[in-house]
Image: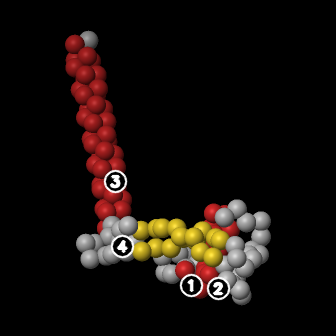
């Protein structure tokens, strides 16, 4: 009876040891994964030599012959995804129902500048 109890305790301790090792391996794996994932986010940060661009809005008067596309040519630079995204933002900002604009009207257009104003 006493030997059986010793044998069962030995088996229980061996199972606990295996469980502790498994928990350690899983914890170490998760820590390594999060370290690698976090490092990739940090590496995408801008360096000190990269200029910072600030987004501003300005009001412009529509002249004869102006279209949203000509405004996109004048104001949409590399900071915008595309000229289409610039036009969508102008339409949304000015609550336009379509892309028709009239001479003499005023529009608010976005632009980027490296100068903090």
Left or right placement of residue 111 versus residue 6 in this view: right
Q: Quadrant of residue 109?
A: bottom right
Q: Earlier in the sequence, mark 4 or mark 3?
A: 3
Left or right placement of residue 49 versus residue 95 in this view: left
Residue bearing mark 1: 74
Can residue 84 be seen by looking at this rendering? Answer: no
Q: Secondary structure at mark 4?
A: loop
Left or right placement of residue 53 versus residue 106 in this view: left
Residue 82 at x, y = what percent? 58, 78
Q: Residues within 10 Å of mark 1 (few under 14, many from 20)?
A: few
Using the numbered discs, state the Cα–Cα distance from disc 1 to disc 2 in whole angstroms: 6 Å
Residue bearing mark 3: 34
Q: Look at 37% across and 74% down and name the residue there.
A: 114
Q: Earlier in the sequence, mark 3 or mark 1?
A: 3
Residue bearing mark 2: 70
Left or right placement of residue 112 versus residue 47 in this view: right
Q: Nearer the viewer, residue 2 or 96?
A: 96
Residue 23 at x, y = what percent? 31, 40
Can residue 20 be seen by looking at this rendering? Answer: yes
Could you tell me which quadrant the N terminus lies in?
top left
Using the numbered discs, state the Cα–Cα distance from disc 3 to disc 2 in whole angstroms: 47 Å
Q: Residues within 10 Å of mark 4 (few under 14, many from 20)?
A: few
Q: Earlier in the sequence, mark 3 or mark 2?
A: 3
Q: Earlier in the sequence, mark 1 or mark 4?
A: 1
């Amino acid at each position: 009876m006493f030997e059986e109890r010793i044998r069962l305790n030995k088996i229980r301790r061996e199972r606990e040891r295996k469980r502790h090792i498994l928990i350690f391996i899983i914890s170490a794996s998760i820590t390594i994964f999060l370290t690698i994932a976090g490092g990739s986010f940090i590496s995408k940060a801008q360096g000190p030599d990269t200029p910072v661009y600030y987004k501003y809005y300005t009001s412009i008067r529509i002249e004869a012959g102006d279209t949203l596309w000509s405004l996109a040519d004048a104001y949409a630079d590399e900071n915008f995804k595309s000229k289409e995204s610039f036009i969508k933002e102008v339409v949304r900002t000015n609550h336009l129902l379509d892309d028709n604009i009239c001479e003499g009207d005023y529009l608010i257009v976005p632009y980027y500048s490296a100068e903090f104003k």
